[in-house]
Image: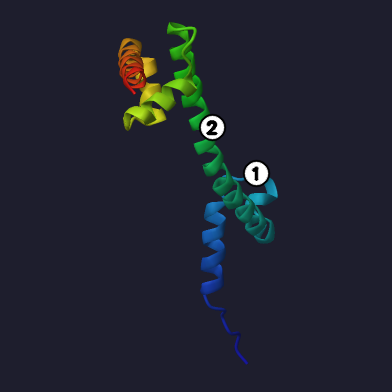
Amino acid sequence: MTRIRRGYIARRRRTKIRLFASSFRGAHSRLTRTITQQKIRALVSAHRDRDRQKINFRRLWITRINAAIRERGVCYSYSRLINDLYKRQLLLNRKILAQIAISNRNCLYMISNEIIKEVGRKESTG
């Protein structure tokens, strides 16, 4: 009986996994079982860290806005600014506010002063 050659499907699957793990070190890029384990682990970490990255950037933006606001006025803070923005129904998200705080502080001060004036006027009238 002649020898039967195996198909290419399993080899193609393993090659695809090997290409994914080609930058891994040691057995993690050579042995098929460890490659599959490391691939699962890498994808889990990537999924988890995408969510962490969103949280970290939001924290960074809040810190930048708070630092810029407190630098100008002692009695004014980040939480008051955001509260007043909601009262005025201004749709400026934290990312944009942080960029304004870094690139153009005077613009952020103008925005906060206008908000303070407007909110103060509304509270005194009624």
Between the residue at mark 1 and the residue at mark 2, the CA separation in whole angstroms equals: 29 Å
Q: Which of the numbered marks, if any, corresponds to residue 17?
A: none
Mark 1 residue type: Arg
Mark 2 residue type: Asn
Asked if one can make out residue 96 in the rendered structure from this viewpoint, the answer is yes
Q: Which residue is mark 2?
A: 56
User: Is 59 on the left-hand or right-hand side of 28?
Assistant: left
Question: At 51% from the left edge and 67% from the top edge, which residue is drawn?
Answer: 12
Asked if one can make out residue 64 in the rendered structure from this viewpoint, the answer is no
Residue 24 is situated, as x and y percent measured from the top left of the image, at 61, 45
Q: Which of the numbered marks, if any, corresponds to residue 25?
A: 1
User: Is 100 on the left-hand or right-hand side of 40?
Assistant: left
Q: Quadrant of residue 84?
A: top left
Whether 39 is drawn above or below 102: the answer is: below
Q: Are there few (<14), some (14-19), or many (20+) residues within 10 Å of tag 1?
A: few
Judged from the image, the secondary structure of the residue bearing numbered disc 2 is helix
Residue 81 is situated, as x and y percent measured from the top left of the image, at 42, 21
Quadrant of the drawing holding the C terminus: top left
Which label's residue is closer to the chain start, 1 or 2?
Answer: 1
